[in-house]
Amino acid sequence: GISRETAGRLQSEVRSRIRRQTSGTGRTEAAVTVEKVNGGYLVTSGNMGARSEMLPVWLEHGTKHMTARPAWQAAAQLEEGTHRRRMEEAMQTAVEGLGS
């Protein structure tokens, strides 16, 4: 459905941004996963080990030693309009189906 498609697109965009903005083992990129939760989909950054637990937060918001390399917020903003359009189209199709 639409939620699964949006989650997949968000995961792909976040991974792409992390890949372009970092250089390393690729574990941070690979840790971005989609989980089905309570009938919906959740895109998260999974466990990469105790030392790396905060790395996604540090990348997104920066630290006093590193400028931010946002991936999550930018990806979500890019997907927002597309998701909204797909939802509106699906609702319109459903409403039109009621009139048949």
Image (cartoon, rainbow, N blue to C red):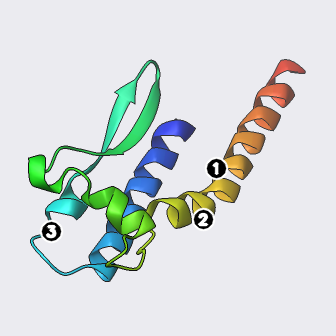
Is disc 2 surrounded by few (<14), some (14 to 19) or many (20+) residues within 10 Å? some
Question: Vertical placement of 14 versus 96: above or below?
Answer: below
Question: Vertical placement of 13 versus 23: above or below?
Answer: above
Residue 84 location, x and y as percent?
A: 71, 48
Is disc 1 surrounded by few (<14), some (14 to 19) or many (20+) residues within 10 Å? some
Spatial CA span between label 2 and label 1: 9 Å
Q: Which residue is situated farthest in the front direction here?
A: 64
Q: Residue at x 65, y 54 (%)?
A: 80
* Element at label 1: helix
| Residue 49 visible in this rendered orientation of the protein | no
> What's under tag 3, amino acid-wise?
Gly
Q: Is 55 situated left or right of 5 in this image?
A: left
* Element at label 3: loop
* Element at label 2: helix
The residue singled out by tag 1 in the image is 83
Frontmost of labels 2 and 1 is 2
Spatial CA span between label 3 and label 1: 28 Å
Residue 63 location, x and y as percent?
A: 36, 70
Q: Is 67 situated left or right of 2 in this image?
A: left
Is disc 3 surrounded by few (<14), some (14 to 19) or many (20+) residues within 10 Å? few
**Disc 2 vs disc 3: Cβ atoms closer than 8 Å?**
no
| Residue 63 visible in this rendered orientation of the protein | yes
Circle number at residue 26: 3
Which quarter of the rendering shows the C terminus?
top right
Whichever of labels 3 and 1 marks the residue nearer the N terminus, that label is 3
> What's under tag 2, amino acid-wise?
Leu
Residue 74 location, x and y as percent?
A: 54, 67
Frontmost residue, 25 versus 35: 25
Residue 92 location, x and y as percent?
A: 82, 36
Spatial CA span between label 2 and label 3: 23 Å
Circle number at residue 78: 2
